[in-house]
Amino acid sequence: MKQIYFLLAFSFLRPLSAGLPPDSLKRIQGVFGKESACFVLKEKAASKNQITFGKKLCESSFELGDRALLPLAITATERGLIQDEKTLFKWDGTRYPNKLWNKDQFVTDWLQNQVSWVTDRLRLQIGADPIEKHLKEFQLDGLVSTNRLLSFSEKFFLRTLPIKKETQEVARRFFYIGKYREGSEVWGQKASGADYASFVGHLVLKNQTWTFTTLLKPSKESSEPVTAERAQALSMDALTELGLF
């Protein structure tokens, strides 16, 4: 009987995953500090999240808005408006405050710099109905939570969405960021709305595959800006603290 109790206690005290340090949540807290933030991390083989930081915020709902570029890129690819990474969107000469927008844009430029005129052009060419249809299929219509966004991004990066795998494979390449320390490979997409910024990502390290999401909201205790770039930077800091990046 004592042996059974010992095994139960040992099981309870073990890290959430063999690939994560036992003080994972403390490390995540150190990264996000006083931010109003949610960070979730899930390994492919796991039945639930290994880490949920900022549980209340992770469960809260928000609107993705018109700037949700990942599902839009999938829809545009499926409809043939984007063929591959070399698809080029021609600039019409309109000047924008963001100088990076004032030129022709490849697909990866559009996604990396959140170029609004490309987004608007694609939404106009596709039409509202096909976009809404895909958002419903992806369970991203209406209000969504970070956990719901994580579920979608995991399916996308693992190519298990209810659309053609070829479409998912082509679109997946648009979000490849690069190869880093210890051979880790990272995919991801920034997004922002009226009062939030987020980064959804995918990481492969040796024999493990992780999907993660960071959501930032305005905080009275932090003077840092709520931007998509900062959501990405904090995501990578969190992965570094966990020894994954």
Image (spheres, helix red, strand yellow):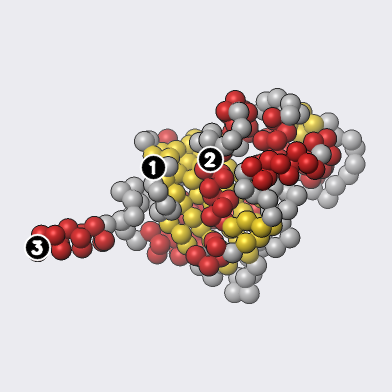
97 and 76: which is toward the camera? 76
Residue 227 visible here: no
Report which residue position mark 1 lands on. 45
Are the residues flagged by discs 1 and 3 in contact, CB closer than 8 Å? no
Q: Position of residue 237 (x, y in %)?
A: 49, 53
Quadrant of res 125: top right
Q: Which residue is drawn at 57% across and 45% down?
A: 152
Quadrant holding the N terminus: bottom left
> Mark 3 or mark 1, which is nearer the start of the sequence?
3
Q: Which amino acid does label 1 sit on?
A: Ala
Distance in Å between CA atoms under marks 1 and 3: 32 Å
Q: Which amino acid does label 2 sit on?
A: Lys
- In the picture as drawn, the residue positioned furthest to the bottom comes out as 220
> Mark 3 or mark 2, which is nearer the start of the sequence?
3
Q: Is mark 1 on a helix, strand or loop?
A: loop
Q: What element carries label 2?
A: helix
User: Image height check: is 106 above or below 95?
Assistant: above
Q: Which residue is drawn at 31% across and 56% down?
A: 15
Q: Position of residue 78 (x, y in %)?
A: 69, 29
Distance in Å between CA atoms under marks 2 and 1: 13 Å
Please rate how many residues cluster around mark 2, counting C-alpha atoms within 10 Å: few if below 14, some from 14 to 19, many from 20: some
Q: What residue type is labelled 3?
A: Met
Q: In this image, 155 relative to 174: left or right?
A: left
Q: Is mark 3 on a helix, strand or loop?
A: loop
> Which of label 2 and label 3 is nearer to you?
3
Quadrant of res 122: top right
Q: Position of residue 127 (x, y in %)?
A: 81, 39
Report which residue position mark 2 lands on. 155
Q: Which mark is residue 1?
A: 3
User: Image height check: is 134 above or below 59?
Assistant: above
Quadrant holding the C terminus: top left
